[in-house]
């Protein structure tokens, strides 16, 4: 079992491996080893059936693993609308210097790709990862403490106004993110308003429809309580 990470695209101590390791130490993650996947560069994973990419640069060390457990804090996101399992592997496995640049940057604009196109970029990146692991990848979404902002916002994230829902697990990527979104939309109006506004204002539902188009799972699911 191994915890894995990749370096980030934006200006941050985590933009370099050395800075990333210091951040991990400062935040108490020195209780285990963490493999920073792009510490040794990139490897290109093919994108089957995509319209934007033929391949995406992932952290090279990802090829050392034959299975993956994807643990995701489901919440809102300032660019993605929401961050579920799809976004986690799409951005989280892409290398910091190359892969994340492919997904985000449009010409000289670092954050140039937004809206539906960005959702489609993430879908193709996630497909490359999911195809790599095949049946040996499982997803867990934790629907608790759901700010409309990403965890990377830290203490500047918007206050949480959406009630906790629970934890979902599935071997189907589309099903788990579809079910997570459906459970948010099923909340009373006052409870869901902020997160739904964030999802829809960023074209976040395109994450789900594009996964359907790419054949990345089943939008029909059965909830089994355990």
Image (spheres, grey):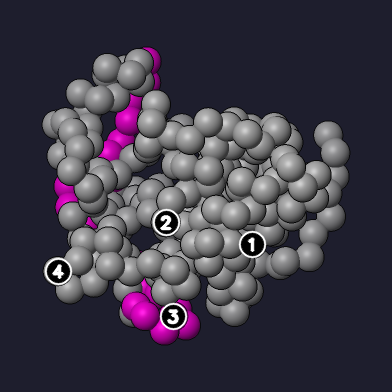
Disc on the earlier residue, 4 or 3 = 3
Disc on the earlier residue, 1 or 2 = 2
Rendered location of residue 131, percent (x, y) = 49, 66
Disc on the earlier residue, 4 or 2 = 2
Q: Residues within 10 Å of mark 3 (few under 14, many from 20)?
A: some
Left or right, 37 with respect to 179, comes to: left
**Mark 3 in CB contact with mark 2 (< 8 angstroms):** no
**Where is mark 3, residue-wise?**
50
**Where is mark 1, residue-wise?**
174
Residue at 48% from the left image edge and 35% from the top image edge = 158
- Kindly report the distance in space between the C-alpha atoms of the residues bearing marks 1 and 2: 19 Å
Q: Residues within 10 Å of mark 1 (few under 14, many from 20)?
A: many
Disc on the earlier residue, 3 or 1 = 3
Q: Is residue 125 visible?
A: yes
- Kindly report the distance in space between the C-alpha atoms of the residues bearing marks 3 and 2: 21 Å
Disc on the earlier residue, 3 or 2 = 3
Residue 38 falls within the magenta-colored stretch: yes
């Amino acid at each position: 079992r191994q915890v894995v990470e990749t370096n980030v695209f934006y200006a941050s101590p985590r933009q370099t491996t050395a800075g990333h390791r210091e951040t991990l130490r400062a935040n108490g993650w020195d209780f285990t080893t963490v493999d920073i996947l792009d510490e040794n560069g990139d490897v290109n994973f093919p994108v089957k059936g995509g319209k934007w990419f033929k391949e995406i640069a992932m952290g090279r060390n990802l090829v050392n693993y034959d299975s993956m457990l994807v643990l995701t804090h489901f919440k809102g996101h300032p660019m993605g609308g929401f961050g579920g399992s799809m976004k986690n592997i799409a951005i989280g496995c892409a290398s910091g210097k190359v892969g994340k640049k492919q997904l985000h940057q449009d010409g000289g604009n670092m954050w140039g790709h937004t809206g539906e196109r960005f959702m489609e970029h993430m879908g193709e990146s996630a497909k490359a990862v999911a195809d790599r692991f095949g049946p040996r990848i499982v997803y867990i979404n934790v629907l608790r403490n759901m700010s409309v902002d990403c965890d990377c916002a830290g203490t500047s994230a918007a206050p949480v106004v959406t009630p906790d829902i629970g934890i979902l697990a599935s071997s189907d990527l589309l099903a788990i993110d579809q079910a997570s979104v459906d459970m948010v939309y099923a909340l009373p109006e006052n409870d869901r308003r902020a997160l739904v506004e964030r999802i829809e204002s960023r074209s976040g539902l395109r994450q789900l429809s594009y996964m359907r188009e790419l054949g990345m799972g089943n939008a029909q699911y059965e909830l089994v309580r355990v």
